[in-house]
Image (cartoon, rainbow, N blue to C red):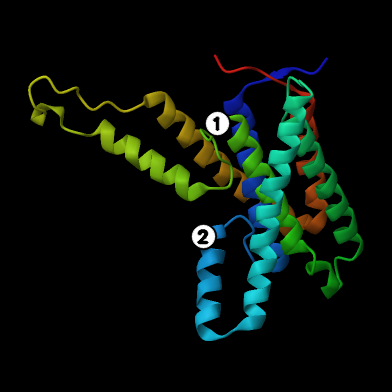
């Protein structure tokens, strides 16, 4: 019988997978696949410079990420309409299936330059799918690929932690850091980092075949029942 899984543990596992896939994308095709801030900034540069071919390449990353997020929302909403207790299962199974197919096909054509053509759109789709899944399930409390947001939120809580409350006005509530949120943000940030290390080592030595253990982890997560928040 599959075990239970709470949102923080699901978020940590998915953040690890996101870090691994992001690092793998850089090694396989020379581009990060979860960094939408950089991609949109690059699109603006390409428009200003009239680099239309590069603009098309950027859109081939942005639009699949957007489509992946939309696909996740549709699958989760459908699952909830069917009154399924763990709506994360459908998008994670889809992600695992696509990752397995990508790994097998990529391993078969690893030495061909054509292997890199579908890599960026597919990996960006997977990143959008995954990030939207945990974002929607957790009510936007947890994200897996948006490291900028993680670091920003962690910095805000650190600012609260070190705030000098002796300067507050009479009757004013003291500024308090949410220590539980700080721990969660730190764990998620560490998970992305460790996933990146694992992905860089795995994809560096095994190439596309490293998609298979990541897909296996996603299938294990999909098999678990998602515990309702306390």
Residue 105 percent across, percent down from the top left: 90, 58
**Left-right relation of 158 to 213:** left
Quadrant of the snapshot with the C terminus: top right
Please state which of residues 65 and 112 is positioned toward the viewer in this rendering.
65
Q: Which residue is mark 1?
A: 139
In the picture as drawn, the residue positioned furthest to the bottom comes out as 50
- In the rendered image of this protein, does residue 143 appear above or below residue 167? below
- Percent across and percent down for residue 63 are 67, 61
Residue 37: image tag: 2
Q: Residue at x 56, y 58 (%)?
A: 36
The front one of 112 and 144 is 144
| Residue in the image at 85% along x and 65% along y | 110
Mark identifier at residue 226: none
Q: Dot 2 surroundings within 10 Å: few (below 14), some, or many (20 or more)?
A: few
Q: Can you tell which quarter of the image residue 219 is in?
A: top right
How dense is the environment of label 1, judged by Cα within 10 Å: few (below 14), some, or many (20 and up)? Answer: few
* Location of the N terminus (image quadrant): top right
Q: Earlier in the sequence, mark 2 or mark 1?
A: 2
State how far apart marks 2 and 1 are (Cα).
22 Å
């Amino acid at each position: 019988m599959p075990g239970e899984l709470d949102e923080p543990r699901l978020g940590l596992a998915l953040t690890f997978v996101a870090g691994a896939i992001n690092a793998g994308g850089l090694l396989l095709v020379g581009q990060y696949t979860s960094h939408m801030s950089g991609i949109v900034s690059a699109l603006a540069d390409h428009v200003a410079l009239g680099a239309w071919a590069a603009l098309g390449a950027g859109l081939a990353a942005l639009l699949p990420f957007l489509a992946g997020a939309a696909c996740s929302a549709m699958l989760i909403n459908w699952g909830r309409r069917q009154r399924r207790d763990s709506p994360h299962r459908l998008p994670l199974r889809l992600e695992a299936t696509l990752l397995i197919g990508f790994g097998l096909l990529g391993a078969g054509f690893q030495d061909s330059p054509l292997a890199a053509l579908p890599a960026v759109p597919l990996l960006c789709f997977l990143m959008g799918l995954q990030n939207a899944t945990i974002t929607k399930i957790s009510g936007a409390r947890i994200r897996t690929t948006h490291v900028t947001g993680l670091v920003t939120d962690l910095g805000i809580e650190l600012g609260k932690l070190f705030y000098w409350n002796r300067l507050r006005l009479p009757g004013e509530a003291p500024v308090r850091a949410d220590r539980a949120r700080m721990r969660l943000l730190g764990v998620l940030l560490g998970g992305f980092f460790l996933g990146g290390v694992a992905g860089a080592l795995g994809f560096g030595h095994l190439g596309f075949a490293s998609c298979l253990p990541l897909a296996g982890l996603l299938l294990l997560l999909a098999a678990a029942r998602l515990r309702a928040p306390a």
